Amino acid sequence: MKKSLLLIGLLGIAGALQAQEGFTFSFHGFVNPHYYADSRSVVGGREDMMLFYPKPIVRDSLGRDINDGWQANMLAITARLNVKITGPDMLGAKTSAFVEGDFTGSTNATIDNLRLRHAYFTLDWGRHRLLAGQYWYAMVVHEIMPMTNPLNMGAPFHCYARQPQVRYEYRLGSLEAVAVAQWQLDNMSQGLLNGTPASSTLFARHGIMPELNAQLRYRTSRLFIGAAANLKTIQPVVPDPTRTLHHSFTWSLFGSYRFDGITVKAQTLLNNSLYEGCSLGGYILVHKSEGGYWTRDWHFNTIWLDVQRNHGHWRPGLFLGYAKRSDIVSPTEDMMPFDVLGRGADLLQLWRIQPRLAYTTQKGLSFVGEAEYTYAGYYDEPVGNLRLSLSAVYAF
C-alpha cells in the first residue's frame, strides 16, 4: 500500500510540473524478471542476486563442504521507474532533473521495498555543467560500465554504487575535467561502532570531509579514455575522543572504443578500500596497548574487460575480470588485538569469465542468457562458482 501511494505521489508531482510553464517530463523504466542458479553458496546481497564471489570451503563433522551444492532463485526486484524533467533556462544555463527508483531496497533487510536510485538536477552552461543530488559513485564511471545483465554489473571488479554528491564538469573540445565531492547513504563504510564492527554512515560523517574525486577525460565519437583519483576520509571508531582519521587513496585508468558495431570497455584500479563501491580492499585497525589505535590499508590491483556487439537482434558479449592482492594482512603478536575491515581480506586473487548472449526485438523487449564463472583464491583452498542466469527486459 505504501509503495502504491508513493508511486501515485510521483505521478502527481509530475502532473504538477507539467502544469508549470516551461517544464516538460517523460516517464521511462523497465521490468526485468531474472532467474539464476549457483553451483555453491556465494558472498553477495539481495538474495545473492548481487554476486561478489563464492564462499570458502567450510566442512561439517563428516568432512562435507556445507557451502557446496546447487541452489536457484528468481526475482523481479530490479523493476525500475524514472521521470526526466526538462525545465526553462535559469541563471543562463539549461536545466533538467532526473528521479529514479527500483525495488531492490537499500539493505538486505528491506529487499522488495521501493528505494531511491537517482535524484539530481543539472545546470548546463555548455562548457560547464553542475550536477547536485544522488548520482553514480564517482569511481563507477558510468560511460564504461560493463554491459552484463545481472545486478552486480561487473562488481567487485567494477564499482557499483550511487552517492549524494556535488559534481562539476568542464569541457574544452575533446577534453573534460571532472571534480566530485560525495557523501554516503546506502553504501556505507565499515568501522567500529560502540566497539562492534558495523557498516554505518557515521564513520564518514565524523570524518567531516566528503569523499573527493578528480578525473581527466578525452572523448571522440569512437574513443573515450581517462584517469581518476579518489580520496576517502573516515573516522574508523565512533565514538572516539581522539578523533583519529583514516585516509584511503584509489586511482583508476579507464577507456572504451567503438568500431564496426563492437564496443570494447576496460578499466584498471589500484583498489584501496573500496568497500563502499561494492568492490574490494579495506584496512586493519590495530588497538594500542596504551590506548588508541592505528590503521593501515590493504590493497587489490584490479583489471576488467568487456566486449559486446551492439547492433542487430543477436548481441553476444564477454566480461573478464581479475583482481590480485598487492599486500597481505598478517598482523604480528605485538599488533594484537586488531580488526580487519573491508571486503576480500581472506582472498589472494579473484577472477571471472562471463560470456552472454542477448536477443533484442529492438522494440523494448530483449532476452539474455549468461554463464558466470567466478574463481576465488582463498588462503587455504581455492573454490569456484558457476552461475547460470536467464532474464528478460521489457523497457518502456
Image (cartoon, helix red, strand yellow):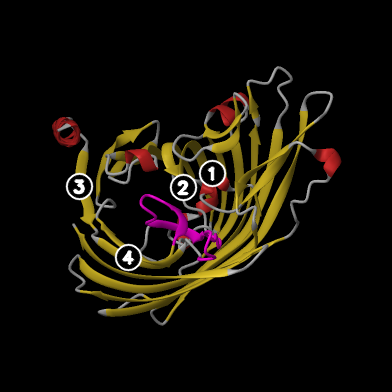
Label 4, label 2: how many angstroms apart (C-alpha)?
22 Å
116 to 16, vertically: above or below: below
Q: Which is nearer the eye, 75 or 213? A: 75
Q: Write down the residue under mark 1.
A: 276
Cβ atoms at labels 4 and 3 below 8 Å apart: no
Relative to 105, is 395 on the left or the right? left
Q: Position of residue 20 (x, y in %)?
A: 17, 30
Q: Earlier in the sequence, mark 2 or mark 1?
A: 2
Is residue 97 something one can see in this rendering? no
305 to 269, vertically: above or below: below
Tell me, for residue 161, which label it has, or none: 2
Nearer mark to the viewer, of 3 and 1 = 1
Magenta residue span = 41-64
The C terminus is located in which quarter?
bottom left
Relative to 304, is 77 on the left or the right? left
Label 2, label 1: how many angstroms apart (C-alpha)?
7 Å
2 to 180, vertically: above or below: above
Disc 2 marks which amino acid? Ala
Q: Write down the residue under mark 4.
A: 36
Cβ atoms at labels 2 and 1 below 8 Å apart: yes
Question: SS class of the residue under badge 2?
Answer: loop
